[in-house]
Image: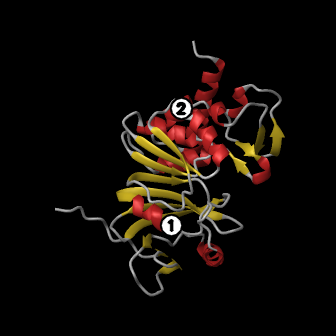
Amino acid sequence: MNTAIEVARQAYAEELRSLTHMASPALFAAFAKVPRERFVGPGPWRIRGRDGHWSTENEDARHLYDNVLVNLDEAKGINNGQPSMWAAFLDQLGVRAGDHLLHLGCGTGYYTAILAEVVGPQGRITAVEIDKAIAERARIALASWPQVNVRCCNGARGPFEPADVIVVSAGATHPLPSWLAALKPGGKLLFPLTPDSGIGAMALLTRKSEEAFQAQLMFGVQFIPFSGAHDPHVSAWLSSALHRDKGMAVRSLRCDAHNKEDTCWLHGEGWCFSTREPVHFKPAA
């Protein structure tokens, strides 16, 4: 017979599938299997939901199996992430068994574990966390997934091994060269494109050629900043661009050398979010 906590996890996964229209059976199974309580510390827990903050009345882990944020460090604004948001975005990545993933800003590792279930034992995940104490918590919590290697370092710097998928879990004003350089042909990069204050967008990039990526911006996210990935000047330009159209016009990220033109939605040094379609990747003969 299923235990009460297993029933709660299954119901939680069903809730996430209903909310997000999750298409991946492997992702659904991961949410139904991975113990969230392993990654959020002992209860009672501080929860943030639609009605504000509250504390659970006891240490019953079933409190965690709801679409709520669980605070890890309330003073710093660090939490375990909104399950429905991550379920929706991770589902769009099309992660496959055997893939090599790079998870930057992995926190205590809950969503790393979700992805580890999806890539399976033949896959690999490099999980990077800059905070030494949090990285150690992740290393302990992820010990059951030998395909995950936790590194305590600055995820803004690189270099990184080539990856099929890169997931960034803190906000950046622009894509970093080290992230783009690590992405394989056809690979996908998911990162929060966020100004220093206010609402940002989740950026989903797919490499089409050496210097061009298909890009989609999905407005409506807020994240703590990624260390080394925020530029105050770019932040101001990004705020203005998002105010215009919330990123709906963006179709590509260009990394080719060019002067600013009418199709440049947000033009930076060595990168440019553009309203024109990307150049598609052509495999070598």
Residue 6 visible somewhere in the drawing: yes
On screen, residue 257 versus residue 103, left or right, reads: left
Q: Mark 1 points at which residue?
A: 176
The residue sitting at the left extreme is 285
User: Which corner quadrant of the image does residue 53 belong to?
Assistant: top right
In the picture, which quadrant includes the C terminus?
A: bottom left
In the image, residue 203 sits, relative to residue 103, either above or below, namely below
Question: Quick check: marks 1 and 2 in contact, CB under 8 Å?
Answer: no
In the picture, which quadrant includes the N terminus?
A: top right
Which numbered mark, 1 or 2, is in the foreground of this view? 2
> How many numbered marks appear?
2
Q: Mark 2 points at which residue?
A: 143
Who is closer to the viewer here, 100 or 63?
Answer: 100
Q: Residue at x 42, y 76 (%)?
A: 276
Q: Which residue is drawn at 62% across and 68% down?
A: 230
Residue 18 visible somewhere in the drawing: no
On screen, residue 208 versus residue 174, left or right, reads: left
Who is closer to the viewer here, 278 or 164?
Answer: 164
Q: Residue at x 41, y 74 (%)?
A: 255
In the image, residue 230 sits, relative to residue 95, either above or below, namely below
For label 1, count other residues whose C-alpha is less than 10 Å away and answer few (under 14), some (14-19) or many (20+). Answer: some
For label 2, count other residues whose C-alpha is less than 10 Å away and answer few (under 14), some (14-19) or many (20+). Answer: few
Circle number at residue 268: none
Residue type, mark 2 in image? Ala
Q: Where is residue 135 in the image (x, y as percent from the top left)?
A: 61, 44
Task: Classify mark 1: helix, strand or loop.
Answer: loop
Q: Position of residue 137 (x, y in %)?
A: 63, 38
Rounded to the nearest angstrom, the CA distance separating label 1 from label 2 is: 30 Å
Q: Position of residue 281 (x, y in %)?
A: 30, 65
On screen, residue 154 versus residue 48, left or right, reads: left
Residue type, mark 1 in image? Leu
